[in-house]
Image (cartoon, rainbow, N blue to C red):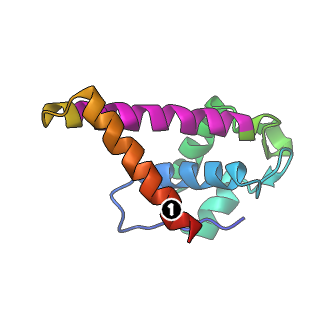
Amino acid sequence: MEILIDTDSTEPIFAQLISQIKQLVSNGNLEPGFQLPSIRQLAADLGINQNTVAKAYKLLERDKVIIGKGYRGTFIHSQAQQNCLIDYSQQARQLMSTTIMQLRELGLTDSEIRLQFAELIKERTLTEAL
């Protein structure tokens, strides 16, 4: 499991940890049942505070990405990949909603926004096909 922390980033370290673990789960690099390092071990490996790792683990457990099994350790949840995809879907909807509001503030109509999105997707599809 490779996690890289960017201390120069404006994103809090616990959030970087969460997003990277979710990305590893989404990509299938961390499978259900995989045992994560202990809070103490991961903090030492990354050179960060144990409380930061504990906060990330607590939030990941809340989102059903990991499951704590007491003294036996912390493991990837059996439904982690599905739960991460739901989370990414919600984030995508929120990002698109914000973008649509900003475009409306610029004076674009919903039809113009749809057209712009369709053209952008078409351009990206053509570019990726090359």
Q: Is residue 31 magenta?
A: no
Instruction: Between residue 85 and residue 66, name the one nearer to us.
Output: 85
- Counting labels gives 1
Q: Position of residue 121 (x, y in %)?
A: 45, 50
Residue located at (62% from left, 43% from top): 57
Residue type, mark 1 in image: Leu
At mark 1, the secondary structure is: helix
Extent of the magenta region: 82-102
Which residue matches tag 1? 126
Where 47 sits versus 61, above or below?
below
Instruction: Between residue 59 and residue 85, name the one nearer to us.
Output: 85
Residue located at (69% from left, 49% from top): 26
Instruction: Between residue 120 and residue 82, name the one nearer to us.
Output: 120
Where 43 sits versus 116, above or below?
below
- Quarter in which the C terminus is drawn: bottom right
Q: Position of residue 52 (x, y in %)?
A: 51, 50
Q: Residues within 10 Å of mark 1 (few under 14, many from 20)?
A: few
